[in-house]
Structure formats: C-alpha cells, structure tokens
Amino acid sequence: MRIDVVTIFPEYLEPLNVSLVGKARARGLLDVRLHDLREWTHDKHNTVDDTPYGGGPGMVMKPDPWGEALDAVIGSGVQGEEPPVLVVPTPSGRPFTQELAVELSEKPWLVFTPARYEGIDRRVIEEYGDRLDVREVSIGDYVLAGGEAPVLVMVEAVARLLPGVLGNAESHRDDSFAPGAMADLLEGPVYTKPPEWRGRGIPDVLLSGHHGKIARWRRDEAFRRTVRNRPDLIERADPAAFDKKDREILSILGWGPGPDGRFGRVAPDVEE
Ligand code: ADE
C-alpha cells in the first residue's frame, strides 16, 4: 500500500518511522511519503492560511497550495492504476471505525490531508470529490489542534491490517470491533506470567487447558466489559448473535430482551 500525507508539519509524523508502521515500511509492505504543503506556496512567507469569508474566529487554509499539492501527488501515480482515496481528517467527518479501517486497508493508495486552523477551503473538498473517493473522517468527538494526530491513528489502524504486517494472521480476528466471532463485544482481560503477582493470581480456568471452557470464559468476560463500558453495543446488537450461554451471562449481568427482542438493562447494574 502507498500512503501520502500532505501537511505543514511533516515532523509531526515522525512516529511513522517507529514500531509496527516503521517495520512495515522497512519491509516494503507500506510506502509512506510525506510532503510539506509549504512547498506549494509562492510568496516569501509561504502562506497557507487566510481570514474566513463571512468573518469569525480563526483562519482557513487557502485552496491554492492544497490544489497544487494534491495535483502533484495524485499526478505522481502510475497511469492506468487505481487513483487514491483521499482521507480528510476533520472533527465534522464521519466516525472512524474498525469497519472503515478494514475498508481502507483494502485500497492500494491513500492520500491524507491533515489540516490546521479552522480547516481547508470547502472548494478543495468539492473539487477532488468530483474526481476521487473522498472521505471526511473524525477520530472522535473532541477537537484537536490539527489532523496530524488523527493521521497517525488512522495509519496505524490500517497498517496493522495489511497482509504480512502482524506476525500472526489470526491476531486481528478477535480484536474488539472486528467483524465475526467477537463482533460488537469488547475484548476481555488478558494475563501472562508470573502466575502470582503481588498476591494476585490468575483465573483458574486459564490454567485448565480446557479450550472450550476458556473460550466460554473469555466470552463471558467480554460481555461483562461491554455491559460496563459500552452498553450501547449490546443494545444495538442483533440478538440472533446471542446463544443460550450468552443470554445466561447477560441475565446474570441484569440484561434481558425487550418486546422487540433486543437486549436492554432489566435490573440494576451489579457492582463488582
Ligand atoms: N482535527 C481536529 N480534531 C479532529 C478529530 N477529532 N478527528 C479528525 N480530525 C480532527
């Protein structure tokens, strides 16, 4: 996969040289190219922003440098090959989810446009939206000073899904939010050696060697965590995904089906 990032702070993206993403790059699984937006300015102050039409606080990123930068980056692709997906980080975008990470991981080329100030002149998004698949994406309901940190988040979430990047191909099967087996449940707790630490042991079942019991225990723990931290995920879930044992643990946790079959809280939260 090729990833281009156009930014006024290329140094903000240094972490892409480290750990999983850094290794994927070194192994040739990921080709990351950083571009300084100011290279496409022509005044002596390398201006990238200006005051907003209509007034108001803050500054808006000018369309000209973005247009020249994106034309150059997009034009550097190989003729006849699939054009990039343009990913525009913005707090007013659609939520970034594991589902979107999976979708993006299947594309050959992504171009990220992290903005500073109050964002990029709207005409840039419209212009490229006419030619490319453009996704305006938010990484959460909070406002950051710029889109660079969101790019780090999204690139890491996408890169770990690329074939060959994680050692074990099974590693993301059980991820929280992964489609399939543990769909829409948070992952439960994990333990490693030593078997006793500061007087705290580990659950006996994990030492039992009984794979069926371990799988059931993990799923029960996933329900406990999800009920506690993300009850909205249980409320939203298709109840057809719950087997008899799932319904038992949900009942113990104070959850049951409503008139429409979907699960909701039917008894007060049990404090543990
Ligand atoms: N830029 C500033 N805040 C952001 C957010 N929450 N998600 C994506 N881009 C952003």
Image (cartoon, rainbow, N blue to C red):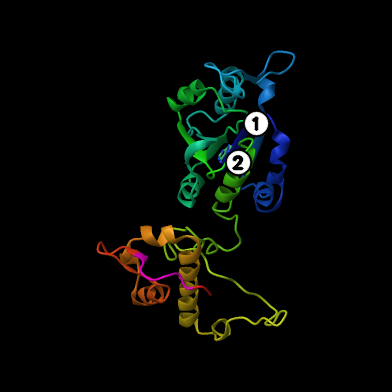
Q: Which residue is at 54% across, 54% downward?
A: 163
Q: Which of pointers 1 and 2 lies earlier in the amino acid sequence?
A: 1
Q: Residue 144, image x and y in percent?
A: 61, 39
85 and 25: which is toward the camera: 85
- Which label number is shown at residue 151? 2
- Amino acid type, callout 1: Thr
**Dividing the image into 4 quarters, which one contains the N terminus?**
top right
Quadrant hosting residue 58: top right
Point out the quarter of the image occupied by ligand 1. top right
- Which label number is shown at residue 41? none
- Which label number is shown at residue 7? 1
Tag 1–tag 2 contact (CB < 8 Å): yes
Q: Which residue is at 50% across, 23% downward?
A: 122
The secondary element bearing badge 1 is classed as: strand
Q: Residue 257, image x and y in percent?
A: 30, 67
The secondary element bearing badge 2 is classed as: helix
Q: Residue 153, image x and y in percent?
A: 60, 46
- Tell me which segment is drawn in magenta: 264-270
